[in-house]
Amino acid sequence: MSEIFYSTDPNFCPHCKHIPCICNQLGAPKKQTEPVRVRFVKNTKGSGTTVVERLPLHPQEKEELLKKMKKALGCGGTIKEGHLEIQGDKKLRAAQILEKEGYKVRIL
């Protein structure tokens, strides 16, 4: 039997490599090998977005975290290519929220 390395299925977990994720059933702790990056990207229209990269989370957990952050920051946001994108320059406040959640954060 071969092991799955990559899948386009949104329920695929890169940590336990199962569809659906069984990390919680295994009791595996979430390990953060590198800090979460928070940066501001200006777009062509003059406004910009705050991008949160390298989150070691399952896609469903990213959606839940984004929902919390949007409510706390009072702005809109989305998930694109596995990164959280939040409307406006909210680097510092987003980093504070992530630190409260227990992540190591690096602001760029």
Image (cartoon, grey):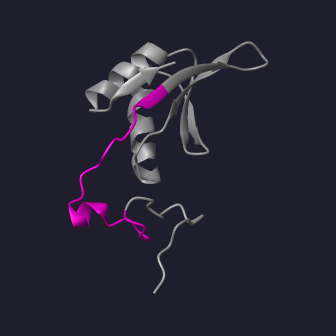
Residue plotted at (47% across, 52% down) = 59
**Residue that protrudes farthest toward the right in the picture:** 44
Residue plotted at (57% across, 66% down) = 7
Q: Would residue 24 appear left or right of 12 to someone viewing this image?
A: left
Q: Would residue 55 appear left or right of 40 to someone viewing this image?
A: left
Percent across and percent down for residue 11 are: 47, 63
Percent across and percent down for residue 78 are: 57, 37
Of 64 and 9, the residue lying toward us: 9
Of 67 and 96, the residue lying toward us: 96
> Which corner quadrant of the image does residue 94 belong to?
top left
Q: Would residue 72 appear left or right of 81 to someone viewing this image?
A: left
> Which corner quadrant of the image does residue 93 belong to?
top left
Percent across and percent down for residue 8 are: 60, 64
- Number of disc labels: 0
Is residue 78 found inside the magenta-colored segment of the image? no
Our reading of the magenta stretch's main secondary structure is: loop
Residue plotted at (73% across, 20% down) = 43
Above or below, 64 against 21 in this view is above
**Residue that protrudes farthest toward the left in the picture:** 27
Above or below, 69 against 10 in this view is above
Q: Give the residues drawn in magenta, as a range.
A: 16-37
Residue plotted at (28% across, 32% down) = 101
Is residue 17 found inside the magenta-colored segment of the image? yes
Above or below, 84 against 97 in this view is below
Q: What quarter of the picture does the N terminus occupy?
A: bottom left
